[in-house]
Image (cartoon, rainbow, N blue to C red):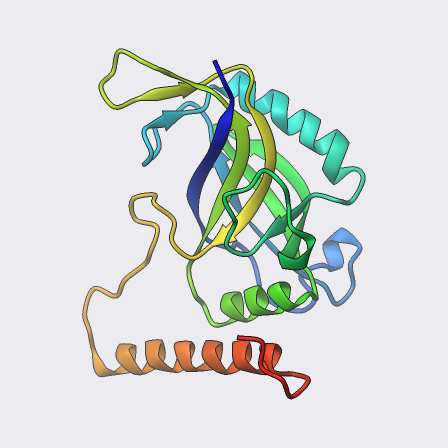
Amino acid sequence: MSKQLIVEYMPFKPVGSLTEQSGAAYGIPGGFVVQGVLQRAGAKNQNGRVYPRNILERECRRYQEEYIDQHRALGELDHPESSVVNLNNVSHNVLKIWWKGDDLLGAVQILDTPSGKILKELFKAGITLGISSRGLGSVKELRSEGTVEVQEDFELICWDFVSNPSTHGAFMRPTAMHESVNKTITNKYARVHDAITSILCEDGKCRI
């Protein structure tokens, strides 16, 4: 059974304060760190895949030793369909991962790279993003219709931040469209647009 690129999505809702001092607890004074759920074991996701807990635990141990402990657990902003992390698009570094029940949580440092600056401004503006795991492996169809199980050959590559997670309920929407809500949303996207433009055009030449 040949390996294929396996991509999964989760809504990423940061916990704790989103300030420039959020990295102090991780020895990064002035750094910007967010925490949230990275992945979930044993449950069928939106793509119809199930990740057995033992396989995810094994890959997390390997990822901890080979990437996090060596301070190179890098990820991208809007991942490509590739098994290689592109350094030109790196936006963050995973500092820590841990389990809470079947949820895999993580603390992620947002880097001061062009993509990292965009990611930081999106978080500051309150934009709901998704977290996407990237890995190589094969899947096996189960008796349950529309369900496949990730197999033992799975190899975790990284986690990326994405704009369009496929998980149900990934985006928060207001229950009533009051004028004040509309203004808030408009202002948020205006601030995000201004921030992205200033980053891409910071040397006077827009790279869009």
Q: What is the total number of numbered labels drawn onto the structure image? A: 0
Left or right for 70, reference 166: right
Q: Which quarter of the figure has residue 91?
A: bottom right
Left or right for 126, reference 67: left
Residue 185: give x, y in percent of width and height: 34, 76
Left or right for 16, reference 168: right
Residue 112: give x, y in percent of width and height: 70, 66
Residue drawn at (52%, 52%), measured in percent from left and top?
A: 161
Residue 41: give x, y in percent of width and height: 46, 27
**Front residue of this view, candidates 61 and 142:** 142
Residue drawn at (47%, 28%), measured in percent from left and top?
A: 102
Residue drawn at (25%, 16%), measured in percent from left and top?
A: 144
Residue drawn at (55%, 24%), measured in percent from left and top?
A: 56
**Front residue of this view, candidates 184 and 59:** 59
Residue 141 versus residue 15 in the image, above or below? above
Question: Residue most toward the bottom?
Answer: 204
**Front residue of this view, candidates 46 and 53:** 46
Residue 50: give x, y in percent of width and height: 39, 24
